[in-house]
Image (cartoon, grey):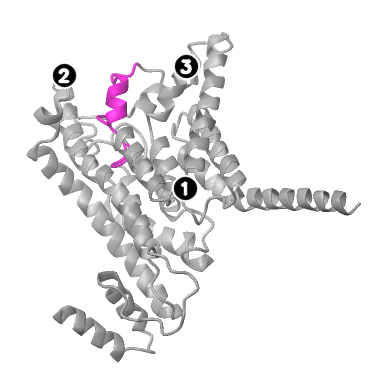
Amino acid sequence: MGLKNNLHNLKEKYKGTKMAPAFNAIHTFLYLPNETTHNGTHIKVADDLKRTMNTVIMALVPCLIFGIFNAGYQHHAAINAAKGIATEVSLMGNFLTWDNFVIGAWTVLPLVIVSYVVGLAVEFVFAVIKGHEVEEGYLVTGMLVPLIVPIDTPLWMLAVAVIFGVVIGKEVFGGTGMNILNPALTIRAFLFFAYPTWMSGDKVWVHGAKAMEGQPDAISGETILGSLAQNQTVAYDWTDMFFGFIPGSVGETSALLILLGGLFLIFSKIGSWRIMLSSVLGAVVMGLIFNGVVDAGWISESSKFYGLMSTDFWMHLLIGGFAFGTVYMATDPVTASQTNKGKWIYGFLIGFISIMIRVFNPAYPEGVMLAILLMNVFAPTIDHYVVQGNVKRRMKRLKLKTA
């Protein structure tokens, strides 16, 4: 109670000053607001922006915990592979171990801390300067960012990207609810284009691989997408891909946990099942088209596109960041389409374009980030034509009735 009273006193002391938003944010983040309504309310609901963001974070926590263990496991597996020792994954034997957790926590948690500290600091600064309340929108972005970057991303690099993403991707548009691009993907895109050698290749996905680059016993951790883009044989089966025992970004490897998180968001009515389902359908259609091209013999095995084109259509759903992007970022209620029909179109095009970019851009065989950002830009246009179509149909029916 002492902390709560002290925060309340500070809140009252600085009420009406420029620092008021900062103390209000700390108070309302830790405790329920102490204001009560004195008149009748129009709508009574149990959720608000803070609860919505916390629900999404709860859906992301399993991916974070799994990513911590997987970071340690991939580190040890890559060291064994450099020594010529094959590693068979065992959930209780060599995956859920203390050593894996320590290595994973040592590398992953600093990414989370930097993401939140830097991002929220920018939010506080803009709240004080502009005189509005601190918005809770970054609560989810702060968790998403460390889950979509390589494990050994330098902390200073992440800090620079977070500042860019929050300022350019959100604040210049007016803050939470006004941005046209997903902030987490804006940060990821900045990292990719500004520091490409740290965002792709076979030395960025496994802890320690980048530091040992060039040494005789150097470890590496090529992702499945990277191997397929080079027409190489993949050393993982579908169960490894589904459960997530593969190299990749921190939180994007386990399709199982992402699926469970998606169901949780759908059940809590926060994530749009229309966008998720239509994105999967779009990816399946594009995958089937590429499989058909290969089956028809229209592309030779020597082509640089053959590896990903010949990949079974359903496998595209399990590898790379497609599942994570579909569940947690394509469904962002601010940047996605708002109409029901628009959500079907928006999601389908994300899935369709994701696999297209994945196949035709072997230098960076991951298309979901660029596909979502592209459709973020077109989401208002999609909704505009959907609404105009509905208006025209209603006007037509009205004319028929009055004729």
Q: Between tags 1 and 2, which lies in front?
A: 1
Looking at the rendering, in which quadrant would you find the N terminus? bottom left
Residue 139 in the magenta stretch? The answer is no
Relative side of 43 to 223, left or right: right
**Does the magenta stretch mainly form a helix, a strand or a loop?**
loop
Kind of residue at badge 3: Ser
Q: Residue at x 22, y 35 (%)?
A: 209
Q: Residues within 10 Å of mark 1 (few under 14, many from 20)?
A: many
The answer to whether residue 336 is above or below residue 285 is below
Number of callouts: 3
Task: Specify the quadrant of the image occupied by residue 126.
Answer: bottom left
The answer to whether residue 282 is above or below residue 386 is above
**SS at circle 1:** loop
First in sequence: mark 2 vs mark 3: 2
Q: Which residue is mark 3?
A: 310
Residue 245 in the magenta stretch? The answer is yes
Location of residue 307 in the rendering, given as x and y in whole percent from the top left corner? 44, 18
Q: Residue at x 57, y 15 (%)?
A: 293
**SS at circle 2:** loop
Q: CA distance from mark 2 to mark 3?
A: 27 Å
**SS at circle 3:** loop
State the extent of the magenta-drawn residues as a range: 233-252
Location of residue 397 in the rendering, given as x and y in whole percent from the top left corner? 81, 49
Q: Which residue is mark 2?
A: 86
Q: Which residue is mark 1?
A: 331
The answer to whether residue 172 is above or below residue 92 is below
Location of residue 168 in the rendering, given as x and y in whole percent from the top left corner? 48, 61
